[in-house]
Image (spheres, rainbow, N blue to C red):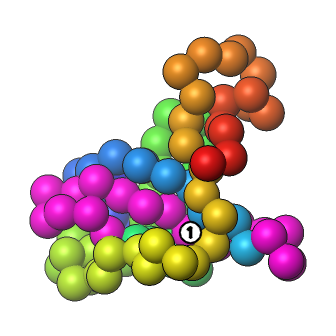
Amino acid sequence: MVTNDGEPAGTVDAVLENEREQIFDGLDLRTPHGPRFVDAPEVARITNLRVELSIDAADLAALPERDPKGAPEFRAAASGRRFGRLWRRR
């Protein structure tokens, strides 16, 4: 994962969805600055190899942690070869 200024941003801890609207809501990250929540508009691109953010490293450090009462959360599954099996709802 990288910021828009090319700095390493950490790792994805969880993928969040807005269940009512059935859309991607954001990401919980483990960053060098501690856990952070990145809202969907701040995610520029997701590929199978990395996530690119639309914010820089300073903006990432200033982000809050996710509200645990917020959107449903998905964690990476330890096994599974197909994309649909890689994420499990908590």
Q: Tell me where residue 63 appears, x and y as whole percent.
A: 30, 81
Q: How many marks?
A: 1
Q: Tell me where residue 86 appears, x and y as whole percent.
A: 66, 30
> Residue placed farthest to the left in the image?
33
Q: Residues within 10 Å of mark 1 (few under 14, many from 20)?
A: many
**17 to the left or right of 29:** right
For the stretch drawn in magenta, the main secondary structure is strand
Q: Tell me where residue 25 appears, x and y as whole percent.
A: 64, 72
Name the residue rendered at 57%, 78% in the picture: 70
For residue 22: magenta? yes
Query: Which residue was labeled with disc 1?
Result: 26
Name the residue rendered at 41%, 49% in the picture: 13
**9 to the left or right of 13:** left
Which residues, given as a range, are shown in magenta? 19-36
Looking at this view, is 59 or 66 the one in front? 66
User: On screen, 11 above or below 65?
Assistant: above
**42 to the left or right of 40:** left
Looking at this view, is 69 or 6 the one in front? 69
**47 to the left or right of 42:** right
Q: Which amino acid does the dot numbered 1 rest on?
A: Gly
